[in-house]
Amino acid sequence: MSDLWLHLLLPLSLAVFHEVKGCLECDPKFAEDVRILMGDIVPTDVPGRTHLLEHHFKEIIHESFKVSHGDKMLRVLAVSKVVKLRIWLKEEFHKLGNETWKGAFIFQGKLLKIRQNLESKVKETLKGFSEVACSEDCVVTEGPVLDCWTCLRLTTRCFKGEYCGEDNPRKAEGREIILFLILLTEIVILASAVLL
């Protein structure tokens, strides 16, 4: 009986994770542009061209997924910043396309460098935005915000709770109160020590 439940529930659990995406995967037009740009770079007579392109295409598009799903705070990003990341990546492909073809191994090495730069740019951009969006004063740039996990545009300008890495808002509030009380206690102790 337990095997039956396993066979029934496994496809459902896999379907849930199949729909989770990263910031760069939210726009199918962009993914197709990347596929076309990569296809223009690799000559048609390269052995295993289709597999080479498909493998590196998945790795590049999936890069933002790895970054944004590693930490709950790296979940939201301004749409304008996503657009800047996409423009940067397209420019990198254009630069690579303007170079002369030196072979598949050189191409893979250059794509690895692009992926590493993309990972650091995505991480830096997500961290910078989440620090601003989750801060107390919350000064966020204008325009819509993208939830990188669900690909939904959000109208909220300031975030709390799960978007900021807090599992429970009451726990986070409790921690803030405790920190305030500790600070207040230290001030009282220092003030009394100075007065004595």
Image (cartoon, rainbow, N blue to C red):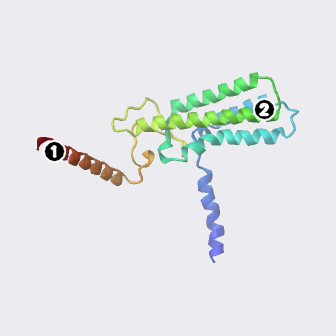
Q: Is mark 1 on a helix, strand or loop?
A: helix
- Residue type, mark 2 in image: Ile
Amino acid type of the residue that numbered disc 1 sits on in the rendered structure: Ala
Can you see residue 147? yes
Please give the label number shown on residue 193. 1
Q: What kind of element bears circle 2? A: helix
Residue 176 appears left or right of 31: left
Sequence-first disc among 2 and 1: 2
Nearest the eye: 103 or 144: 103
Q: Find residue 138 and report its image quarter.
A: top left
Residue for point 46% across, 30% down: 143
Badge 2 crowding class, 10 Å Cα cut-off, few under 14, some 14 to 19, many 20 or more, is few
Residue at screen point 44% across, 45% down: 163
Q: Could you tell me which quadrant the N terminus lies in?
A: bottom right
Q: Mark 2 points at which residue?
A: 106
Extreme residue toward the top, this view: 98
Q: Where is residue 108 in the image (x, y as percent from the top left)?
A: 76, 36
In the displayed structure, would residue 186 be above or below residue 8? above
Q: Where is residue 154 in the image (x, y as percent from the top left)?
A: 46, 39
Discs 2, 1 touching: Cβ within 8 Å? no
